[in-house]
Amino acid sequence: MDANIKITVDKKNMRVTANFIPATKGGGNLSCEDILAKLASMSITTGIREDAVQWLCESVRPVNASVLAEGTPPQIGEKAKIETYVKINTDMKAQFREDDSVDFRDLGEVTAVKAGQELYRKIPPTLGKSGLDVYGREIQGLPGRDLKIVRGPGTVLDEHDPNLVRAAIEGKLFMRDGLMEVSEIHRVKGDVDYSTGNIKFKGAVRIGGTVKSGFQVVADGNVEIFGNVEDAVVISEGDVIIHGGCIGSGEGSVSARQDVYVKFIENQKIEADRDIIINGEAFHATLLAGRSIISQGKNSTLVGGSCEAKISVEAAIFGSISDTPTKIRIGTDPKNAEKLKNIVMEIKKTTESLDKLEKSVLFLYRQKIDLKGKLPPEKQLLLEKLETAKKSIPMKLEELENTKKYLKDQKSELEQASAAARRAVYPKVQIFVGNQRYTINDNLGPSVFRLIHGEIARISR
């Protein structure tokens, strides 16, 4: 009997197997070329295992399911992944100063982002490398595992790229349950102390406890503090709302671009571009307001220290029965007064510089005359530079004088300003309106102080 071979292709066309019966005595054998020719007649061209064909040809025993050819399976591509563009500061550490000492209050800034800033992108899965079946036909590669892109609050998908996530608002960037979130408010559950470090944030800040001595809170938005402010620094581009009080040894300060609301103040400095609203008393405080200082409540008191506001100062009581010196100044913007002082100083310095320039130029011209109209090159260059500088100073002086005039014109509102005590005014309280001063020497009842015909007058309420 001649040798016989039966070739089978599996259902997926990925494997070719053969059942082989060798020739009996006297029968004809199959050569490798015969088997290869049979595979070719079946259009099997890929993944042929020539070693397996050779082995069959040489076998003297029956063989079942010998693998003669295998296709190349398609590959699976890379799975989708998330690429982030902002690193969140989760490892708050004490910062080194320039002298290599350590500042344990500075633990680094809160991670903040701007509206529209790119946060992260989903990189789609790739398609794997194609394969081939035993007939040489291409089998498309398989895609990697995909991910569903998920957004946290305060984020938004890019309108042109569905895989890109941006910040929807400006605020604090943080992780919650594996998702990036953006919040307009930075929340501190407890106190601002060594556990939190100083707070610097380009948004609003809400503090559940007290700002401890020596620490800072700086924010572009409103700052709300549910505890007290000790000898600390609080700076806000909006309002500062303190549910407790400001109390310390005089090392603390609160500054707001808008209003400050506080329950009570002792020994501290409070500054607001608009109003300072106090729900109780202020003892030995320094208060500066661009508009008004208002101490609310039946027993509200301004005693000791100084109060300065452009429009009005109001409280139930000015001073105390122990005749504590207290200064109240109205009718001038505290910041304008400081600016005016600086402008006057700058005008003086600029005028002195002009005088020195003129003397130097005159000296060089005299030398030029002595040298028959020709200075050495370096002195001629110096003369030209001095003359150029001299020409620019009058213009600068004019600008300074205009600014000075503008700031002085702001004082025209003096007669509109008032200081009002709803219940009493005690001795050693001094009322200032512009350059005028009014000193209280007796116990007074309800009073309003204002400028009338250039002098401070008291009006009984």
Image (cartoon, grey):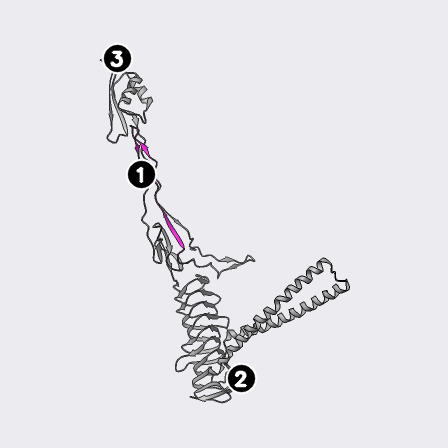
Q: Which residue is mark 2?
A: 436
Instruction: Name the amino acid, label 3.
Output: Gly
Foreground mark, 3 or 1, reads 1
Left or right relative to 8: residue 294: right
Residue holding disc 3: 28
Residue 227 percent location from the top left of the image: 40, 69
The residue under label 2 is which amino acid type? Gln
Outermost residue to the front: 373
User: Hey, which quadrant is residue 398 in on the image?
Assistant: bottom right
Find residue 346 and name its label. Answer: none
The C terminus lies in which quarter of the figure? bottom left
Start-end of magenta stretch: 116-139
From this view, report whether residue 84 is shown above or below residue 240. Answer: above
Q: Position of residue 445 (x, y in %)?
A: 44, 88
Q: Secondary structure at mark 1?
A: loop
Left or right relative to 33: residue 170: right
Helix, strand or loop under label 3: loop
User: Label 1: which residue?
Assistant: 142
**Most foreground residue, 443 or 409:** 409
Residue 330 at least partly seen: no
Query: What's the amino acid at mark 1?
Result: Leu
Q: Residue furthest top?
A: 26
Instruction: Check disc 2: other Cα within 10 Å, few if <14, some if 14-19, many if 20+.
Output: few
Report how far apart the C-alphas of labels 3 and 1 lie in the structure.
47 Å
Labels 3 and 1: the sequence-earlier one: 3
Asked if 118 appears above or below 309 in the picture, the reply is: above
